[in-house]
Amino acid sequence: GKPTAIRCDNGPEFISHDFVGWAQKREIRIEYIQPGKPQQNAYIERANRTIRYSWLSKHLFDSLEEVQDYATKWLWFYNHRRPHKANGGKPPLMAA
């Protein structure tokens, strides 16, 4: 369903009139973290780092569609086939 709030940093894409208006129109509260405090958004910062170093910085893409396709396939692999320490080194599909 629709989120009640979005937590984000103070990047230009999140303080833009378009983004703020989009959120207001949908009655979604924007929660900004304090400037210079990325640890307040640690889970997202970690996810961004994982994506950047796992595949985004290693490939050149020709289109946004190509990036979206790769991201979808990578996310499925990451969530289903990649070995997880919590599962004794087994992928989630084998641990179930």
Image: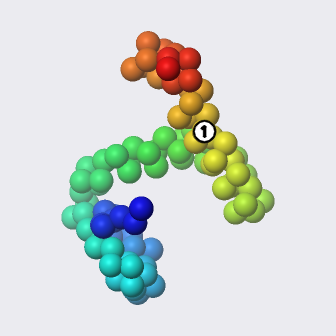
Question: In the image shown, does 63 or 24 lie closer to the viewer?
Answer: 24
18 lies above or below 4: below
- Residue 24 image offset from top left, x and y in percent: 34, 83
Is residue 35 shown to the viewer in this render?
A: no
- Residue 91 image offset from top left, x and y in percent: 54, 21
State the quadrant of the N terminus.
Answer: bottom left
- Residue 14 image offset from top left, x and y in percent: 39, 73
- Residue 19 image offset from top left, x and y in percent: 43, 79
Disc 1, SS: helix
57 lies above or below 66: above
Question: In the image shown, does 3 or 19 lie closer to the viewer?
Answer: 3
Is residue 78 shown to the viewer in this render?
A: yes
Q: Which residue position holds label 1? A: 76
Question: In the image shown, does 92 or 14 lie closer to the viewer?
Answer: 92
Under mark 1, the amino acid is: Trp
56 lies above or below 33: above
Say whether residue 27 is left or right of residue 71.
Answer: left
